[in-house]
């Protein structure tokens, strides 16, 4: 546990203990003993990989959520919070969080975060976490709109894999945000006296933000699936066009080539039954005319079927 | 805030404050102070982009909905309403709303809107919002029926993208209308004394309209998906037909061309084993007959398999 | 309102007012005043296009359902019913309904419909409406079974559009029947004293019929989707077969044609390096033998891959 | 009603009336009068085609289920049961049921079925019905595993229709078993004193069996859908392979054939510009070498694209 | 029943009876009599193939779960537990379980498992079962990631069947874990005094692990379906490319071959109308030039359509 920065609120002994780094089991248990935290909860803090959730213990609430980071490869670090009567103990896996504005406000005298109880502090942290996810979601939206352009303009064969990857990520993100929203809602509607009516109003707003985030993610997922469908539609349409061109060229020339082959045969011209056409004076022009006629007939047939208008 | 038109009802100090334009934070907070509106709610008013919802504060209800506009590119403006004991404060983002008939009725003496409380006024506004969406939905229906004609008559390659876009828009529209319906239902079933039994009957009717709108949207979405399926079916059927024509032409002529090639070879005729057929008196007619036989055999085979009946 | 046939039950002033035609607003409001019906409900009667539903007003219940007609193009007319303490007022859009047996029973002395209250009369009407839908559903079943034969026997390219249309109709029918079932269930479980225990038993039976209708519709819809899948499967299988035939013919003859082309070239035979094969005594039989060998080799290859067994 | 075998339990006048054949309305109403059964319930008995359900009348429970038969074409006969305080009246459509062991146990003195009330008898019948469905479900499993072998080993074009049919049957079976499970659960949790605590334990077990049956059916349906997907995947893979072979053969030989055609032209050799290659001493070997080079180049290209490795 | 190892806890007569092997009915009923276990529950123990579930009998709870084994072909053995006031009787089908650490702790004096009641022992067993499934799920994840590489790198035709099999297994695994989680949750929230508050905290943690396992399985299933989609997309893209190459080669060479065939015809050159081109001095170069022109024109056409850029 590299850094354990305790900040003691001066009014009424209110306390926010923010622990950065959760792998040092010994230090964890030390903090645990100090605030009488349940070993099971501390185990969740130490292990990471928890779903966002709210669990109530006798003297405090245990809330787990996840700080998601735009533009980062990592799936976001786990933020664990113990919300007691006059303390909030938060654990995060590594330095780097969206809580600096809150720290600033805590340092300011007469700020609301400082004046109010631990419930409001917990709200402030959760609000920062939920709002922190907005640029991440916007990033997905931008990415999808770029993919839409690629899918609709050119034959972007690699975009399927991107879409597939994107849909998976959005699915994971949705799960996290839904669980976070549930945890916030459970905190809001908790019967505990600890949470004051006014804080509940703020938590409702925070829950509302989480729900809106989930809805946006949902609409991106729909968009994603739609783009996949569109890509498939375009691919199959393209195949149709290619087949059409092949068919038209083939069906026009195959019979013509047969005719040229026919009159390229070397039958003995001694017999008057063998290829008399070759001896005719106008044999060649007649054959050329016949071929032209066949081409016209085929073009008319294809045109009637609407196969000539190869659309892009 | 360009226009702030306050209309004071003469009976019992009832008041509708309709604020147009929500970007001026200062003016907003002024109105907020006047009616003691919660800063969180005012923030929602200012930000826009809220889901339709109903939130209850101690002294008033806060209702957000969305005025959707047929034929407009914009996703509709947000309408926020504070419904208090003897006032309704409504905020809209820009001028242009479906409330002119209500304004007219408010000016008329002895009109019902004027005679009754703020709950009835809120109903009247919501009713106008919900009914305003009907031409928009009808427009989608018309668009879809045009697309149906295009899909079923011709090979409309661009209609897939249109359908994809349409389905997305309908999905968004459905979300908005469902949330609006939920907010109305929550208003109707709210335990608050403010809402009189008779108004609840009206709100039930309004909720019913919203639900019917959602059902219509749902059926258009089903229609949309069905049209996509139909389009794919037609495309693949078309490919089948094209392949069929290619196959028939190819399989008929390829063997024939082989035979003509065979008798076009230049083997030395000195040897009696080399291509004696070329020397026969009836060689050419015999070969022509053989070819005709092959064509007939193939046609019979294809016909038996049902491959000749190329249906449109 | 062309016909307003009032039938006054002789026992205890019980009354069934059946109004046919709902477009005459004045007449509607007259009936409305007589029975003190709410203007919102009368508006629903007049507008048509309502979802089946049950709404309770203070003195009566307002029930909307839809009389569906087998073999008719129209989507069925709306039937609106006001069920009061000692009256039933029903509104239908046009003449032609399945209520003649009930009218007959009402004329008969000592019939149950006559002896019992308005709740039983409402049940009798609803029962007639629900049972009236059975032949319509059976008709869909017959239609689907015909389509199944077409899909499985021949290449019915038009059946996709039929199936698509059918599925849409079934979806709409399902919505109507589900809403009707819900309305009946809500009537059955209504706390109102008006509905006697025995009538509730009858309503349960009626609800059961509606649920069974929905289940049948559901199974037809599944059938519909399954037939579409089957059609696609057959189409793609057909394409595979066609491609297979084309491939076999092509791959057998293309190399052979190359060889015939080779020996059709006109190189000067003066050089002993130019096409000496043409001068061999057994050149032609040797080439024929080579070709035969190639054909056999290819057939063996195809057969090993299982490509020769073109199944129907 | 061919057989009406009444078996009177000797203890406390307990009675199981098992009626076989339900088409004789008169006989039905006779039994109905004897036990005061409701006409609506008797109608359900007579009509058949009911969903499994439990309905409670004042003096008895009315339970409908379905006896499914492995290896039978018929959809199973309807079993209707009236469970009263000291009687069970069961109706089945035809002879042949899984109740012989129960009959046997009833004949045995001191058997549990005989010692306990009508609730236990009802349980025993239901248990027999639910367990009777196991071999039927196992049969579907065996059928599916056979189809899996066919789909994975050979190109079984007819298995799609079988899978489609199977999925439909499983869907119907699932509906029946789910409704049966619901009816049993409603019987178990019925507040009626008639059902003793111990019997409830037995009914829970019976419900558990029904739920397990539904789960097995569900997994078979998933299997079914998976096999369809697999079949489509294999078909499309097969088409790909066929196209690949066609493409390789075609693209190799088409250019070669062009060259042979080129030197098969009959331009007058008098001009030194016309086809001088034909006069070269090593023209033929040079052309053969050129062709070999082209083939090698193409094979290298295809091999680089990974198109040569036609996998089975 | 090969082994029946009874371990008697020394404090307060607490007892864990662990029975290995459940096929010996006689021995089962012996244990059953000893602890007064219900015959229905013992039947479930004996039969195996139960869904995980919790059933409450008067004096004990009956819990069934399944010990899943990574790397094993078998679907995991059934673990049945009777949790009474001062005893836990567990039945497993064969030797080999994840309970050795618990046995070890039971042997240690002053261990928590030994100090606390049967409820804690039941928790410890369940926790071991749930945690035992983690390596199994991880194994699926590894397998899927290998398949992802195969699908994205090469044309892995056999991976579809693997994915299909995998998805089925994951579906089954999910069912088991969901039912296990439900049973644990029902145990946790059971009103029985037997389960102490502190144990409930531990059970909540255990339930949380089960839920997380289900979520991971769900995400693997989504991944699985996504990989299938990706595989199909790649296959169809590959087909498109192959068709493209075939089309380009064919459409370029088919017209050229027609021209060579044309001038390979053997019309009598005596007539001045028959193939005069063959007599021109520059006939051959002219034809070659014409052909080159045609090739260029076609390449330009294809390039404009974007068909030449065959992407990998």
Image (spheres, coloured by chain):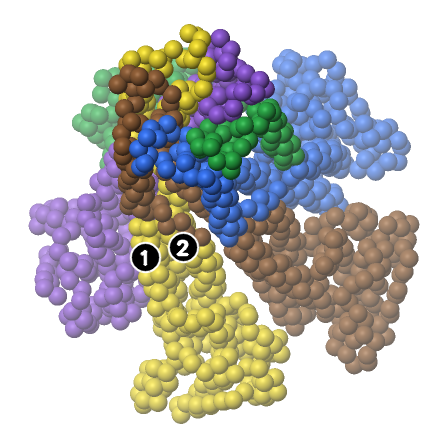
Chain colours: A brown, B yellow, C purple, D green, E blue
D70 lies left or right of B46: left
- Image quarter in which the C terminus of chain C is found: top left
Q: Give the quarter of the image for residue A300.
A: top left
Which residue sits at x=59%, y=24%?
Answer: D281
D203 lies left or right of D21: right
| Place of residue A67 in the rendered image (x, y in percent of width and height, measured from the top left) | 73, 59
| Dot in front, 2 or 1 | 2
Q: Inspect this view and state whether residue E3 appears.
A: yes
C145 lies left or right of A252: left
Q: Which mark is residue B159?
A: 2
Q: Secondary structure at mark 1?
A: helix
Number of labelled discs? Answer: 2
Q: Which residue is mark 1?
A: B145
Q: Inspect this view and state whether residue E90 appears.
A: no
Residue B296 sits above or below residue A140 on the image:
above
Which residue sits at x=46%, y=76%?
Answer: B194
Do the residues at pointers 2 and 1 share their chain? yes
Residue D252 sits above or below residue A132 on the image:
above
Question: Which is nearer the eye, E182 or D82?
Answer: E182
- The chain to which mark 1 is attached is B
| Place of residue E166 in the rendered image (x, y in percent of width and height, measured from the top left) | 61, 32
Question: Which is nearer the eye, C124 or D59?
Answer: C124
Q: Secondary structure at mark 2?
A: helix
Point out the tag, 2 or 1, that comes first from the N-terminus.
1
Q: Residues within 10 Å of mark 2 (few under 14, many from 20)?
A: some
The Cα atoms of the two marked residues, 2 and 1, are separated by: 12 Å
Residue B9 sits above or below residue B209 on the image:
below
């Amino acid at each position: 546990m590299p850094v354990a920065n305790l900040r003691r609120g001066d009014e009424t002994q209110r306390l926010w203990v923010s622990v950065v780094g959760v792998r040092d089991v010994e230090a964890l248990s030390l903090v645990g003993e100090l605030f009488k935290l349940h070993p099971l909860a501390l185990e969740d803090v130490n292990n990471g990989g928890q779903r966002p959730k709210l669990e109530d213990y006798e003297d405090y609430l245990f809330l787990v959520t996840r700080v998601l980071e735009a533009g980062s490869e990592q799936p976001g670090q786990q933020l664990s919070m113990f919300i007691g009567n006059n303390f909030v103990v938060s654990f995060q896996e590594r330095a780097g969080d969206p809580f600096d504005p809150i720290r600033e406000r805590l340092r300011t005298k007469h700020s609301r975060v400082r004046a109010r109880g631990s419930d409001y502090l917990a709200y402030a942290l959760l609000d920062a976490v939920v709002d922190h996810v907005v640029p991440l979601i916007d990033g997905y939206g931008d990415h999808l709109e770029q993919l839409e352009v690629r899918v609709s303009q050119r034959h972007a064969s690699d975009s399927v894999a991107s879409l597939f990857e994107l849909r998976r990520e959005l699915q994971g993100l949705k799960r996290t945000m839904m669980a976070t929203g549930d945890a916030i809602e459970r905190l809001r509607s908790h019967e505990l006296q600890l949470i004051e009516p006014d804080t509940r109003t703020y938590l409702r707003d925070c829950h509302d933000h989480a729900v809106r985030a989930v809805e946006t993610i949902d609409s991106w997922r729909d968009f994603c699936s739609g783009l996949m469908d569109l890509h498939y539609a375009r691919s199959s349409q393209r195949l149709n066009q290619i087949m059409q061109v092949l068919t038209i060229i083939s069906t026009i020339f195959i019979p013509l080539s047969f005719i040229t082959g026919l009159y390229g045969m070397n039958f003995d011209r001694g017999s008057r039954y063998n290829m008399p056409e070759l001896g005719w004076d106008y044999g060649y022009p007649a054959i050329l005319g016949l071929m032209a006629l066949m081409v016209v007939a085929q073009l008319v047939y294809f045109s009637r079927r609407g196969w000539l208008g190869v659309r892009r």
